[in-house]
Image: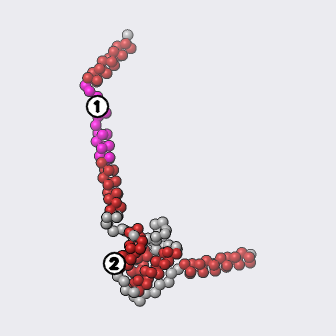
Amino acid sequence: MRILLTMMLVCLCVYSKASAAAEDIHTFATEKQQQRFQYFTKNLRCPMCDNQNLEGSNSAISADLRDVLASMINDGKTDQQINEFMRTRYGDYIFYDPPMNRNTLWLWLVPLLLAVVAVLVLVRLVRKKGEPADASVSTEDRARARRLLDQETEQETE
């Protein structure tokens, strides 16, 4: 029992030290600066991780970017200057909501084009379903089919 308690205590100590080391501590002069920092860490993507923001990532590059971000905010950089720094260094990929420009135009147009194609296909299917099934059969073909059916029924009755 003592061994189990000792192991639990060691694991707890190791876990608390690891989580404290992973936690970034940034101090800001005002609450507004703290809010800006939180906004950027939530809305900037980790360049190394798959679909994870800077706030939730434990990668080394995210920790470095949080440090850079905190120093830029403390130095009085504007949001535009911070965005431009991130864009020049990592491209538009770093933004969860990329701006519409020549490079990202396809990101905005492909969903729109897919929606238009889906609507066109749906309209075509609905129209086709509303047409009678024998609309493509000519009257001559119908008359011939009718004669063949009549002949077959006459042969069955004999």
Type of amino acid under label 2: Gln
Q: In which quarter of the image is residue 148?
A: top left
Which residue is located at x 28 percent, y 23 percent?
141
Label 2 Cα crowd, 10 Å radius (few <14 / some 14-19 / many 20+): few
Percent position (x, y) of residue 21? 56, 80
Between 114 and 150, the one nearer to me in the picture: 114
Residue marked by disc 2 = 80
Type of amino acid under label 1: Ser
Relative height, residue 147 to residue 123 (above, below): above
Relative height, residue 157 to residue 62 (above, below): above
Relative height, residue 97 to residue 113 (above, below): below
Q: Which of marks 2 and 1 is nearer the N terminus?
A: 2
Magenta stretch contains residue 100: no
The span picked out in magenta is 121-139
Residue marked by disc 1 = 136
* Viewer can see residue 31: no
Which residue is located at x 37 percent, y 10 percent?
158
